[in-house]
Image (cartoon, rainbow, N blue to C red):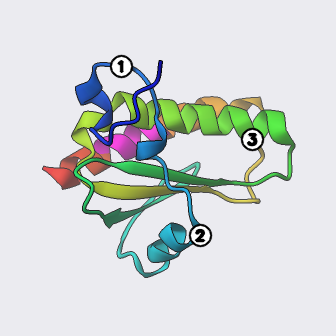
Amino acid sequence: MKSKSSQPLLEQGAFLFPPSVRLHHKKEYLTFFRSEQVYRLKSCVIFRVRNSYGHFRLGMSVTSKFGSVKRNQVKRVVREAFRLAGHELGSYDYHVVVSKKRNLEYPYLSSLKSSMKVGIQKIRESVE
């Protein structure tokens, strides 16, 4: 049974990605346009804005150009990277953007995994 509490993800002791750590509404995404904290990685761009929730929240924009299967694979990789590092990401909203220029075929997924590791490390350093 899923918990509906707004407690941070890892304090619940579960390896879930509940709705409380996701961005849902267009209004929440619009705040990233005035963000000054941008991490440009080889395979994506991560925007960051401080929030008042006490834990991180994640939103993603991934092109649908290559179909739902590839798009969902990319989203799974991004969610997994943020889920594993969730307790170190601070009280911020993150928006990961994968542009239409990216080819989402096989080599991209492996480069995205390594790129996300580098990006999460940069974010950890800036949170401390």
Seen at 35% across and 76% down, the residue is 36
Most foreground residue, 81 or 105: 81
Give the structural element (helix, strand or loop) at label 1. loop
Indicate the amino acid at tag 3. Answer: Arg
Of marks 2 and 3, which one's residue comes earlier in the chain? 2
Q: Which residue is mark 3?
A: 71
Name the amino acid, label 2: Lys
Asked whether residue 118 is drawn in magenta, I would say: yes
Could you say which is closer to the camera, residue 100 or residue 11? 11
Q: Is residue 50 magenta?
A: no
Instruction: Work out whether residue 127 or residue 59 is closer to the camera in this orientation and state it.
Output: 59
Left or right: 107 in relation to 6 = right
119 on left or right of 105: left
3 or 1: tag closer to the N-terminus: 1
What range is drawn magenta here? 116-121
Q: Which residue is mark 2?
A: 26
Q: CA distance from mark 2 to mark 3?
A: 20 Å
- Report which residue position mark 1 lands on: 14
